[in-house]
Image (tube, rainbow, N blue to C red):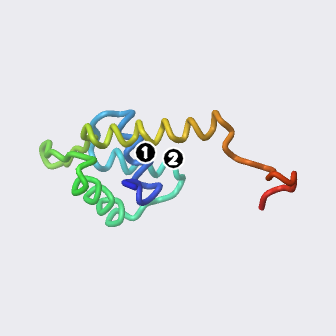
Amino acid sequence: MWFQSGRRRDLCAILYDAGELRGQKVKTRLERYYDVRIDPQSFYATLDALVDAGHLERRTEGIHDVYGLTDAGASRVESYYAWLTERVENNERRTTDAGDRPLD
């Protein structure tokens, strides 16, 4: 699966919504969502991994790197959204099995 972490998934969701953003803007939005400070080195390593995998593109604007989803990245976000929506809408969370006992 291309989402090897929730951070990658959430970072791509932010860019899906926003279009292109400077790296620092993406980091700030993710930190606000998580309500925690993210180590810059770890964050930029995540961006690099997504660029290397072909899910993000990076371009330079002045002294800043700007990131956006590739078509492949957008497709993965949409695919994940469809999968998650199906789980929620179909109430895939099972609370009982055939013997009417609660599942652990």
Tag 2 residue: 33
Estimate the x, y position of residue 75 in percent, counting from the top left: 34, 38
Asked which secondary structure carries label 1, the reply is helix
The answer to whether 18 is drawn above or below residue 80 in the figure is above
Query: At numbered mark 2, what does the secondary structure look like: helix, strand or loop?
Result: helix
Most extreme residue toward the right, as rendered?
100
Locate residue 93, reporting x and y percent: 70, 47
Query: Callout 1 environment at 10 Å: few (<14), some (14 to 19), or many (20+)?
Result: some
* Residue 94 point in image, percent of width and height: 74, 48
Q: Quadrant of residue 79?
A: top left
**Image quadrant occupied by the N terminus:** bottom left
Report whether 91 appears left or right of 99. Answer: left
Most foreground residue, 97 or 23: 97
Which mark, residue 6?
none
Left or right relative to 87: residue 81: left
Residue drawn at (44%, 55%) of the image: 7
At a point 66% along the width and 43% down the height, the residue shown is 92
Q: How many residues crowd mark 2 within 10 Å: few (<14), some (14–19), many (20+)?
A: few
Nearest the viewer among 4 and 44 is 4
Residue drawn at x 33%, y 38% is 74
Q: Is residue 48 above or below residue 93?
A: below
Q: Amino acid at mark 1?
A: Arg
Residue 55 placement, left or right of 37? left
Q: Amino acid at mark 2?
A: Tyr
> Between marks 1 and 2, how big is the CA–CA gap?
6 Å
Question: In the rendered image, which residue does mark 1 sit on?
Answer: 29
